Amino acid sequence: MLGCGTVGQNVLNLIERRRAIFRDLGVEIEVAGVLVRDPDKAREVPAGTRMTTDPAFLQECGVVIEAMGGVERPLALLRPYLRSGRPVITANKALLAECWDELRGHALAGRLYYEASVMAGTPVIGPMSTVLRASTFTRLQAVLNGTCLYILGQMEAGRAYADALAEAQALGYAEDPPTLDVGGFDTAHKLAVLARFCADGDFPYSAVEVRGIEGVTLEDVQAAAAAGERIRLVAELTREDGEWRAAVGPQRLPFDHPLCNAGAGRNAMLYEGEECGTLIFAGGGAGGMVTASAMVGDLLDYLLGFPGHVPLH
């Protein structure tokens, strides 16, 4: 495993909790090592878990779970591993979005598993990469960032943007600085990943148009409410003049829109296809154990012989 923050710790604990399932498959899971910056830091992990700053143990592994985040460092560590033909499980949407030119060949070969990269434990990539391909895709709308959802919800309760952001940071929902979330870039990363399953397998992250919620005022939120609407940071993929357009930005949506009534803190996606009709996915889009559930699910898929998530050819 690479990294052992909140998600990594939950992955290790869930693997331990599910050992009986692995044994039913005839498999014994051994954690060869966990690459961390500080091996002596207190962590809630199974007893005997090996923490190390030396990545040499990766050469022993049959599969790597990447939970460290970032782009350049994990790519450098994973590059030789992937080239050797071994699989990787990750939730790293930034890595997938920004380094797709290098990763796409491995994804096409079924060596990349990344259900948790979008909407965490709510399965959307699995259906989009399998059964939904029989339907002609037409449009996608989604709310994919819990931090923005929390801030806008606080503004609906009458708090100014700056106060709502400060509270989100105090609660650990937003980073410092919070640009990745409130600037829309986290959502744009996720939208680029989704676009490769339903629009274009080579869809570039650079083509996503991005606006965040920094310019949304309390007056904007109140005006929307007076008109029976809510403001949400929406990721949208549509076809315009024969070209796919991916955009992230605040939109006013009716109170009864599926992206507005999925529940506090819950991500949601509306998927439309000619044959399948309108589908709605909603659930937890963040959190250590929620994300870990999808990553350990990917590990089970690998052990069962299912390929990773293959983009459009």
Image: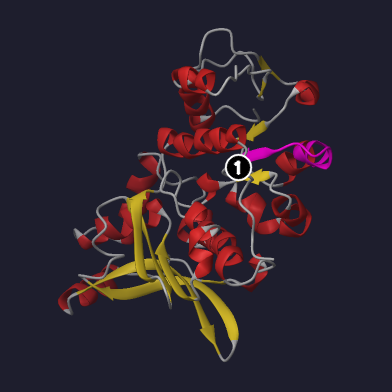
Q: Amino acid at mark 1?
A: Phe
- Circle 1 residue: 306
Q: Nearer the viewer, residue 158 or 211?
A: 211
Residue plotted at (26% across, 52% down) = 264
Quadrant assignment for the C terminus: bottom right
Q: Decide: is 292 above or below 310.
A: above
Residue plotted at (60% across, 42% down) = 306
Q: Which residues are magenta?
A: 78-90
Q: Nearer the viewer, residue 170 or 264?
A: 264
Residue plotted at (46% across, 24% down) = 14
Percent of width and height locating residue 312: 64, 65
Give the quadrant of residue 170: top left
Q: Decide: is 73 above or below 273.
A: above
* Residue 14 seen in render: yes
Percent of width and height locating residue 222: 21, 72
Residue plotted at (45% across, 35% down) = 293
